[in-house]
Amino acid sequence: MNRFPPALSRGVAQVTDSALGPYQTAVIRIGFSLTWLLFLLREFPHRQELYGPDGPWSRDLAEQLVAANGAFTPLLWADGRAWFETVYALAVLCAFLLLLGWRTRTMSVLFMVGVLGLQNRSVFMGDGGDNVLHLMSIYLVFTRCGRVWSLDARRAATTRARGARPRDRVGPVLWGGLGLLLLLATLTGRMDGDRFVPVLLWTVWAAQALWWLVGRRARTAQPRILLDVVANVVHNGALLVIMAEACLIYATAGWYKVQGSRWQDGTAVHYPLHLEYFSPWPALAELLSASGTMVMLVTYGTVAVQVAFPFTLFNRRVKNVLLAFMILEHAVIAVVLGLPFFSLAMIAADAVFLPTSFLRRLGGLAARARGRPRPRGGAAAPVPGRRTPDGRSAGGAPAEASPAPGGPPGPHP
């Protein structure tokens, strides 16, 4: 006899049986990896001055700051230009592979290492979007962000179509090599200054090792289903944290603006439009600032939307209208104020609130543009690994035999 209310039982079943928001997490993965990749490529000619040995923030200053705050950065593990170039090139490569969704579990971890390693080396580089990217790179590690729109999802679909049990050889080799490097870094004391990142890296590595062992050695489906439930709960918790983080950013920004006199009299929007640093298109900035009514609408509209947005999550239609306004506002900021990477980071964070129906239609348009046939009836393709009440995956194969993107047989964390 079920002692819990039906609504509570359905909610618990939904949280444990599936990774919620697969399209939203895929967009977040694509958005932040693309933002970081474009930033690294854009600043490639200036990389030595930004994060390398030629920068004004010297190695000695970086070591003092890292010793004080315990930040994680592999750039300080060795001196010399060769080590810096290696770390920078790996950061670019991992961002590109995460964008494609190749071995997303591995690439999400290496993506986080690249972001933290470069940003913690020179903490004063960035325009505000780097803080969002810093946090989201950590949250992405806990999500199953390769369920759709990724090379992992394509490989899983191909394996299901063949009806064969997946046999992954690249995943174990990749994680084994990374485990050896992590062990060497730990034994040589490279991670003594930081506590959170080493614990996180070892936890993820141990979890993946357990996943591989259970997938290969378990004689029944129960251990695999249990691990799949744990992975879903962790994913859904991380997704909730991402949503709360986005709401917190807008709420705090809006309430601080309310208290500032610059936002009350409109000068907070007027002044940046006349600063040379924030005016890549002076004629456009002059056109926008010439109308006092326009400046007033932008000023008070920005504050109102940021303060109200967290409360509109209870009304889907109002939320979608404000979400579209914020995305448009960030696009205007990218062009008018010359802050493309800040705007891309914020738009990627906003994407967690996009409706699933809209994202599915967007995916359908992209598929037709590539010449791929759309599923019959216009329905979206099933999300790999989602279990139905009879214990089978949405793709038709048993849940315990669903392919593991970037990992061993069995459902992937």
Image: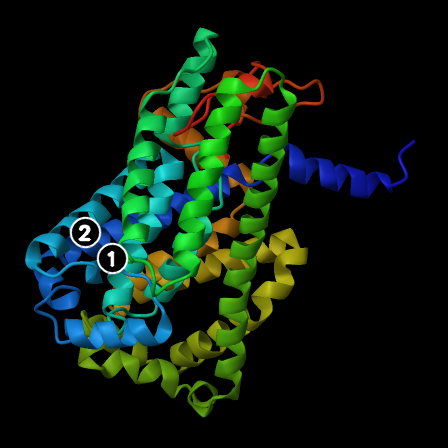
User: Which residue is pictured at 28% across the width and 61% down the height?
Assistant: 73
Please give left or right for residue 247 compared with residue 87 in the image. right
The amino acid marked with disc number 1 is Pro
The image shows residue 314, relative to residue 386, as above or below, that is: below
10 Å crowding of disc 1: few (<14), some (14-19), many (20+): some
Mark-to-mark CA distance, 2 and 1: 8 Å
Residue 25 visible somewhere in the drawing: yes
Q: Which color scheme does this rendered protein use?
A: rainbow
- 2 and 1 marks in contact (CB < 8 Å): yes
Identify the residue under disc 1: 74
Identify the residue under disc 2: 87
User: Which residue is pictured at 30% across the width and 39% down the height?
Assistant: 180
Q: Residue furthest front?
A: 187
The image shows residue 173, relative to residue 183, as above or below, that is: above
The amino acid marked with disc number 2 is Val
Residue 380 visible somewhere in the drawing: no
Please give left or right for residue 305 compared with residue 349 in the image. right
Q: Residue 227: which quarter of the image?
A: top right
Q: Secondary structure at mark 1?
A: helix
Please tell me which residue lies in front, 51 or 264. 51
Q: Position of residue 63 (x, y in %)?
A: 23, 72
Name which of mark 2 and mark 1 comes first in the sequence: 1
Q: Position of residue 101 (x, y in %)?
A: 35, 35
Please tell me which residue lies in front, 382 or 156. 156
